[in-house]
Image (cartoon, helix red, strand yellow):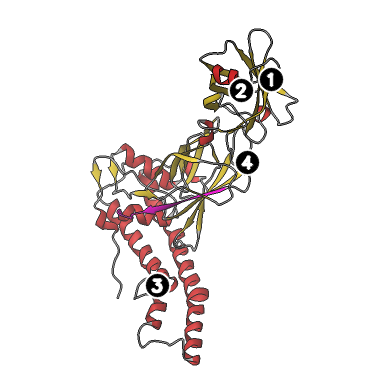
Amino acid sequence: MPLNYTLLPTQLGAYLKNLRKLEAQLEHALRASAATHNRRLLSQANGLRQTDTEEARAYGKQLAFFDSTLAPGISSLWQQFRDQMESLEDLFGILAVDIPISEDDKAASPLAIEYEYEDINGAISIAKRKGVWGALYNDMVAFTEYVTANVITFGTFTAKSGNRGTLTVGSMTGRPHALTGTLVLEVVDESVDAPKLSVVNELTNPLPDLSTFVKADRDLQCEKSFEDGQVGLVMTINRDGLTTPTESGDNGNIFSATSIATPKEGDMNGGTLQGRVTRMAVAPIWNIEFFNSSARTTKVGGTTADTTTGTVALDVTLQNGTRFQSTFDRAAAHALLPAATNNDNDIQFDIKTPRIGDRWTRTITNDEAGNFSTKLAKLRRVHLPTSGVNLWTDSLAGSESVT
């Protein structure tokens, strides 16, 4: 029989409210941002004084107790509550009676949620949500049930000082369970063909299980779409040097509007393509060559151009597949290289590909506008549908005051 969506929002909301009570106690033990937090109560006006030796010692002992005993104890209770809730003898057992939970779902690790991905030439997307939360997500989609979404916003994309490569954000969006923190992208593979970055969200506040970061299941490949269930992000990160490579050694401004596509390790040295322009004694006058190192011993491609006036569009696919496009100014070449055998031998096009040690950061802010969305995000890296026909009453998962 179908799941009873009249009852489930209240039932699930009750579980989430009870989990939140423990989480709130954990926040009071660990944080100091609100006047009611444990350490702030002790240090308020007329509270324990740091200028008094005995009172300062007592304050330190209290903080040590909060951090090393109270918080871990509450976190352990929270995890036990979560694990009990997510067992087939408890809430998950209720769900399993009325929604299709496959053997794949039951084999998920953990039972709650596991993401299965599709990788098409480096483009990563979620192919399947496995586990009981995944089964509930799919059932809610089928029956057009949905919850209030959280809105995710981002700060400035910032490069670490000293980075050798340059990157820009092509696109970035967040799922309702993307948590507030700092996104960290770090190079783990510097190959020119397919540079890859690890993806980690360093959380602003620890989760109830005391986790301080969330790591993506897969690494991100530049210029490829990337979707990850753990960090809850969908994004594309690009090497802007492909559309605007850094050019040097072109003493006569012979090349302009240059771009490089499908860069290959075999055609470049650390993302730098070497070029040479030579004036020939007979037509075609211009011999344009490309090499994979500054020694210019291994030629990987080339083309020619004729006449000494105007410009011509170049489109050259190099030996290993790199595509070089540029506007070649024949008049500028003529001015720089007026006689046969003259050449400009130190032209370089650097795509500033990311290198090992390079790092970028960007802040993530979750507005926590949806009660179901927020509490599930703290529970597991998962969200429920946020569009449909039947919207759950969000207050059913609201937080209760405990006095």
State the separation of the CA atoms marked 2 and 4. 40 Å
Q: Residues within 10 Å of mark 3 (few under 14, many from 20)?
A: some
Identified by mark 3, the residue type is: His
Report helix, strand or loop for mark 2: helix
Marks 2,1: beta carbons within 8 A: yes
Nearest to N terminus: mark 2 or mark 1: 2
Nearest to N terminus: mark 3 or mark 4: 3
Determine which residue is flagged by label 2: 336
Q: Is residue 6 left or right of residue 255?
A: left
Q: Is residue 224 left or right of residue 306?
A: left
Q: Kindly identify the residue that appears in the image at 49 percent across and 63 percent down.
A: 210
| Residue 28: assigned label | 3
Nearest to N terminus: mark 3 or mark 2: 3
User: Looking at the picture, does residue 292 appear above or below residue 57?
Assistant: above
Query: Is residue 306 or residue 210 the one in the foreground?
Result: 306
* Residue 272 placement (x, y as % from top left): 63, 33
State the separation of the CA atoms marked 1 and 3. 75 Å
Image: magenta residue range? 359-370
Identified by mark 2, the residue type is: Leu
Determine which residue is flagged by label 4: 189
